Amino acid sequence: FTLKSCISLRKSFERESMRGHGSRTLIIAALVLLFFSDTSSSHPHVFIQNSLRIVFDQEGLVGVQVNWVFDEFFSSMIADEFDCNRNNTLEKSEIDAVKKGAFANLAKFDYFSFIKICGKPFKVAYIRDFTAALEGGKLIYEFMIPCHVTAGTAFKEIIISQYDPTYYSRVVFAKDKPVTLEGAADFEVNWRISKNLKEAYYYGQVHPVEAIVRFKRRYE
């Protein structure tokens, strides 16, 4: 924590303690602050399972649809804070609140999404179509990363890795269907998951795991 964060959190705790439920709010505030702050603590405390849907149109790649499934503990904290009517469903107003309070700040970290197109970095400046849900006790985020790459007769390659540079959160690919394709009938596409041993983050201690997708136009 920074000093400013500690003071803010302490004031929140004191206010909520007077109402009789300070410890619960303190835990929620601490988790959200740590997960979405600029100065996260070391080693992972939040666990995210990610899967990617590679989306094509008639011209080529149009973007990457991201699905995140959070661990049960963090999911329960977010549900406790944002599922205001306690119906185990996130409604439109609650999703908007989740986006503002527990997602938007990830723009500072490129939404934990790092992309290269034919070897060149592609900055994830914005996302669209964010939504959130509670399913089976798990918090789920979905959002689209627009990324337009026209297909040609030769293979083009896009590399996607998702990770928290501070390593407060650990993002791992789903074991079942980590990558799926949409609208790819007109293209020859192959993909694989691989650890990049040439790059590292978090003081050089952790190597990113990447989805490497190659595609070209299919000709009969």
Image: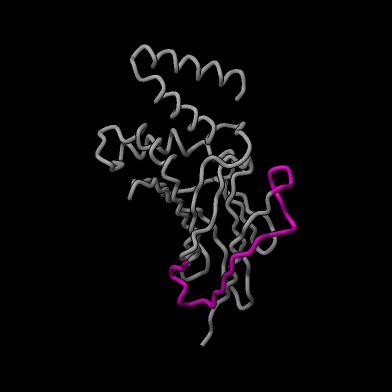
Q: Depth check: give the residue in front, 219 or 100.
A: 100
- Taking 29 as reference, is 131 above or below it? below
* Image mark count: 0
Q: Is residue 6 left or right of residue 81?
A: right
Is residue 139 something one can see in this rendering?
Answer: yes
Q: Depth check: give the residue in front, 130 or 49.
A: 49
- Per the image, is 201 magenta? yes
Residue 80 in the image: state x and y as whole percent.
Answer: 35, 33
Coloring scheme of the render?
Answer: one colour
The image quarter in which residue 73 lies = top left
Q: Depth check: give the residue in front, 142 or 196.
A: 196
The image quarter in which residue 185 lies = bottom left
Residue 150 in the image: state x and y as whole percent.
Answer: 57, 67
The quadrant of the picture occupied by the N terminus is top right
- Taking 120 as reference, is 141 above or below it? above
Residue 85 in the image: state x and y as whole percent.
Answer: 25, 33
- Per the image, is 117 magenta? no
Is residue 55 something one can see in this rendering?
Answer: no
Q: Residue at x 54, y 45 (%)?
A: 111
Residue, far bottom: 220
**Span shown in magenta:** 180-205
Residue 121 in the image: state x and y as whole percent.
Answer: 67, 54
Q: Residue at x 68, y 53 (%)?
A: 207
Q: Depth check: give the residue in front, 96 or 112.
A: 112
Q: Residue at x 47, y 14 (%)?
A: 11
- Taking 65 as reference, is 5 above or below it? above
Q: Is residue 19 left or right of residue 38?
A: left
Q: Is residue 197 left or right of residue 78?
A: right
